[in-house]
Image (cartoon, rainbow, N blue to C red):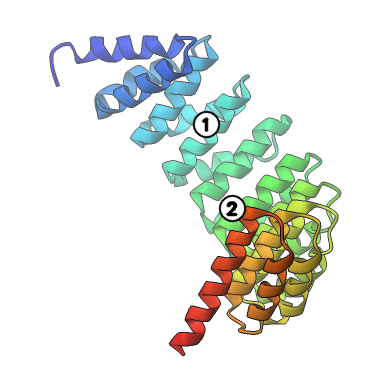
Amino acid sequence: MTDNTQEIIASLILDFTNPNSDIRERAVVQVLDYGDAAVDPLLAVLEDDDANVRHMAVWALGELGDHRAVQPIISRLSDPAERVQDWAARALGEMKAVEAIDPLIALLKDGNPSTRRNAAAALGWIGEARAVPPLIEQLTDADSVVRSNAANSLGNIGDERAVQPIIKVLDDPDAWTRGQAARALGDIGADDAIPALLSAIGDSGEWVRYNAVRALSLIGAQEAFEQLVEVLHNDDSPNVRRGAAEALAELGDQRAVAALEESLNKEDTQNLKRVITQAMQILKRDDDAT
């Protein structure tokens, strides 16, 4: 490092105030080159009046991964600017900051829904199993984003204690939350979830159906074959039909080739036709290999 390192870092942090987002982001990338020397100057601006400065500082500290920043970043989970809160949660996750787990669990009871949302997300990114019971409690939070973040985080952690509580979330009034529940069940990979996921294929929410289809393929649910074919042929959403095509390829049942060929002949969505063709190629390649 040169004698004027701190001056250069200070100049780059000053660019965090620039109204041009490209300049702000470039300044963060350049600050990272200074490693440990940048930590204290970044910590010093975490309570700056400018939300852009706080945002960029949290981002940079998360990338640097210095654990001196953990407690100051936890304080940003209650920042007035939601984007700062979001990045604080991401930073703690990137740092795998296990020392943040107890403070984050405490924040799950915070009166501000935004703080609870970000605490739930951060716990999932850190990925420690002791966060499972408090995250399960948040599956019934009054705020739908807290519930969806809790479900997603439980999926990231992958602990089977969460399976039955997440199955109940498939009946949540919020479609996004139901979709995250379906996705989480696939990430955990629990066979116990198969009947509930088969029912979720008929959900009114497009992304609930898509995530249910993908979850069934991740679990390897061969009993889902007939329903996946039905989805491939008849679902109103191209995204869900795409998920069904991919799922059928992943399940590896050679009966799917005929169903995919039938769908290809009547499908008018070019991107989906490409996915169906790829699925057929995967199945035929697997058949040739046996």
Left or right: residue 52 versus residue 224 is left
* CA–CA distance in space, label 2 to label 1: 20 Å
**Residue in the image at 81% along x and 56% along y:** 236
Residue 226, label in figure: none
Residue 45 lies, with reference to residue 117, above or below; the image says above
Tag 2 residue: 131
Crowd class of label 1 (few under 14; some 14 to 19; many from 20; radius 10 Å): many
Which residue type does callout 1 highlight? Trp
Q: Residue furthest front?
A: 265
Residue 70, percent across and down?
Answer: 44, 34
Pick whichever of labels 2 and 1 is earlier in the sequence. 1
Which residue type does callout 2 highlight? Ala
Tag 1 residue: 87
Judged from the image, the secondary structure of the residue bearing numbered disc 1 is helix
Residue 90, percent across and down?
Answer: 51, 38
**Residue in the image at 82% along x and 68% along y:** 199
